[in-house]
Amino acid sequence: MIIPKTINRLIGQAMHTYSMLADGDSVLVAVSGGIDSLTLAAVLQQWQQKAPIRYHLSAVHLDLGFDSGKVSGLVRRQLAKIGMEVEVELTSFGTDAIAAGKGGGGCFHCARNRRTRLFSLAREKNCNKLAFGHHKDDIIETFFLNLLYSGNISTMVPAQALFNGALTVIRPFALIDKQQIRTMAESIHLEAAENPCPLAGTSKREKVRKLLSDLWEGNPQMKGNIFSALSNVRSEYLLRQPVSS
C-alpha cells in the first residue's frame, strides 16, 4: 500500500495529537464495507509494521441483514487482498429498524444498535481501542447535523474515552478528507460495497452532505475554514442558557 507523504503525515499528526495508540493496545477496527473503513484496516495493518510500538489488530463486520451476505462477502475478499481476516456477525439491525416502522428515525436506531454491539464486541475481545473510518468530512457533517437537527454545537471527536476509560474510540482519518482516502484505496485496488439499505440517500446526513457539497463548489477554502473553527471556539461570544423563571 502506498500512503502519500502528505496523507501519512496527517494521519501521524492525528495519532500523536490525540494519543490514539500506545504500546500493548488491542485495536478492533469496525469495517462496514465502505471505502473508509476498508482503507483504515489496511493503514492500521501497515502501521503495525513501522510503528515504534506494538499493538494487536483485529477486524469485525456487522452484517445488517439486507442482502444475504453480499456485503460481508465483499468485505472478506477485500481484506484478503492485504492478508487480513475479518470476523462477520449476522444481525437484523437494519431490517428491524425498517420493519418496526421507525420512519425517518430508522437510521438513528440502526446506528445506535451497531455502536452498542461494537462496544460489546470490543469488551468481549478485550480490546481497549475501537477504530472507525470517520474523516474530516464526517466531522464537519456531524457538526451541522447537531446544529440543524439537535440544536447544539458539537461534533464527533478524533479520540473519545468511554466507560471510565476502559474503551477509547479512535478516528485516525480525522485530519484527512474523503478524496485522500480514495487515493490510498486506489493504490491497493480496494473496492467498496454499495450500501444495501433501502433508506440510503434519504437520511439527514445525506441532506447535510448535499448542502455542504454546494458550499464547497462555490468556495473550496470553506471546508478548511469550518474545520479550523471547530478547534477555535470563542465561548465568550456564544449565548448563555436562558434562566427559567
Image (tube, rainbow, N blue to C red):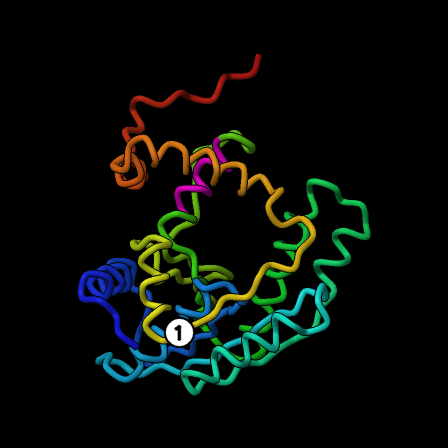
Number of residues whose C-alpha sits closer than 10 Å to that of mark 1, classed few (under 14), some (14–19) or many (20 or more) = few
Q: Is residue 183 left or right of residue 195?
A: left
Q: Position of residue 35 (x, y in %)?
A: 45, 64
- The quarter of the picture where the C terminus appears is top right
Q: Residue at x 36, y 76 (%)?
A: 188
Q: Amino acid at mark 1?
A: His
- Residue at point 43%, 72% (across, down): 190
| Magenta stretch bounds | 139-147
**Image location (x, y in percent) of residue 225:** 26, 36
Locate the N terminus by quadrant.
Answer: bottom left
In this view, 87 is above or below 195: below
Residue drawn where x is 28% and y is 32% of the image: 219
Left or right for 32, reference 211? right
Residue 64, quarter of the rendered image:
bottom right
142 part of magenta stretch: yes
Task: Determine the image quadrant of residue 244.
Answer: top right
Instruction: Name the residue furthest bottom.
Output: 83
Instruction: Tell me, yes or no, if residue 232 can be seen here.
Output: no
Looking at the picture, how far across and down is residue 11, in whole percent? 27, 63
